[in-house]
Image (spheres, rainbow, N blue to C red):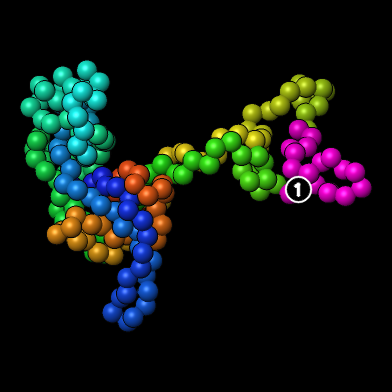
């Protein structure tokens, strides 16, 4: 199954056969534990739940803790579900390793949570231009007119208006990235280019949607 979870370690570069430097993101993909298999007959679809990262049992919520106990598995910090070809071929409790999932040259999609930037104004969040800064103008970095009219517009701010607010910390997927190298001895996955999220964050790597059957 072409899918695995890992922890983003950061970026570096490697050299190819011609001496060209290739920027890569290094992902530490420890062996994922197979938690649950979902089948068409029981659940209506095929998928596999993978777990990653050790955690103390007392830090796991009781319903999840009981579920791990019933399956005779050690609790894990992260649990994610993958709907990919070959998911039902894995066995509950088995390990899913990075060299079994990917090889150099594979094209993958990487999903992570982007860096959170807190509450941001419209200039930082949306790229608005600032106002004049001379002759006593008090309009510098503010939003400005919202463009709402009492006739026709209903005297309200319409949904979708670009305003200040929470920036970042969203689920982001980068499509069609190339696997440069798989280091099975150190459980490392080197992917060309940048992937979302800060260092130490969880990322999900899976076969690109455009590689799957029926994709355009």
- Residue 20, image x, y percentages: 37, 77
With respect to residue 84, does 103 lie above or below? below
Disc 1 crowd, CA 10 A, few/some/many (<14, 14-19, 20+): some
Residue closer to the observer: 82 or 35:
35
Q: Residue at x 36, y 64 (%)?
A: 12
Query: In the image, is 175 to the left or to the right of 78?
Result: right
Residue 11 location, quadrant: bottom left
Q: Residue 139 colored magenta?
A: yes
What range of the chain is rendered magenta? 129-146
* SS of the residue under disc 1: loop
Q: Is residue 213 visible?
A: no
Q: Which residue is mark 1?
A: 130
Residue closer to the observer: 88 or 133:
133
Q: Residue furthest bottom?
A: 18
- Residue 84, image x, y percentages: 23, 43
- Number of numbered markers: 1
Query: In the image, is 94 to the left or to the right of 196?
Result: left
Q: Residue at x 63, y 46 (%)?
A: 124
With respect to residue 176, does 93 lie above or below? above
Query: In the image, is 157 to the left or to the right of 87?
Result: right
- Residue 164, image x, y percentages: 65, 35
Q: Residue at x 9, y 26 (%)?
A: 71
Residue closer to the observer: 107 or 167:
167
What secondary structure characterizes most of the magenta part?
Answer: loop
Residue 89 location, quadrant: top left
Q: Is residue 65 visible?
A: yes
Q: Residue 114 colored magenta?
A: no
Q: Residue at x 22, y 39 (%)?
A: 53
With respect to residue 6, does 23 lie above or below? below
């Amino acid at each position: 199954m072409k899918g695995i979870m890992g922890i983003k370690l950061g970026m570096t570069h490697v050299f190819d056969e011609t001496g060209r430097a290739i920027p890569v993101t290094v992902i530490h993909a420890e062996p994922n534990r197979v938690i649950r298999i979902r089948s068409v007959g029981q659940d209506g679809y095929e998928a596999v739940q993978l777990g990653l990262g050790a955690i103390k049992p007392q830090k796991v919520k009781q319903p999840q803790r009981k579920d791990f106990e019933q399956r005779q598995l050690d609790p894990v910090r992260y649990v994610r579900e993958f709907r990919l070809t070959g998911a039902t071929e894995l066995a509950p409790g088995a390990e899913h390793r990075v060299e079994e999932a990917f090889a150099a040259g594979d094209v993958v999609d990487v999903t992570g949570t982007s860096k959170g930037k807190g509450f941001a104004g419209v200039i930082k969040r949306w790229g608005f231009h600032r106002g004049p800064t001379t002759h006593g103008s008090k309009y510098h970095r503010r939003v400005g007119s919202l463009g709402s009219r009492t006739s026709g517009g209903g005297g309200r701010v319409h949904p979708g208006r670009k305003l200040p607010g929470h920036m970042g910390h969203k689920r982001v997927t980068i499509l069609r990235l190339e696997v440069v190298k798989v280091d099975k001895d150190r459980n490392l996955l080197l992917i060309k280019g940048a992937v979302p999220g800060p260092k130490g964050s969880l990322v999900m790597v899976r076969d690109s949607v455009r590689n799957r059957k029926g994709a355009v």
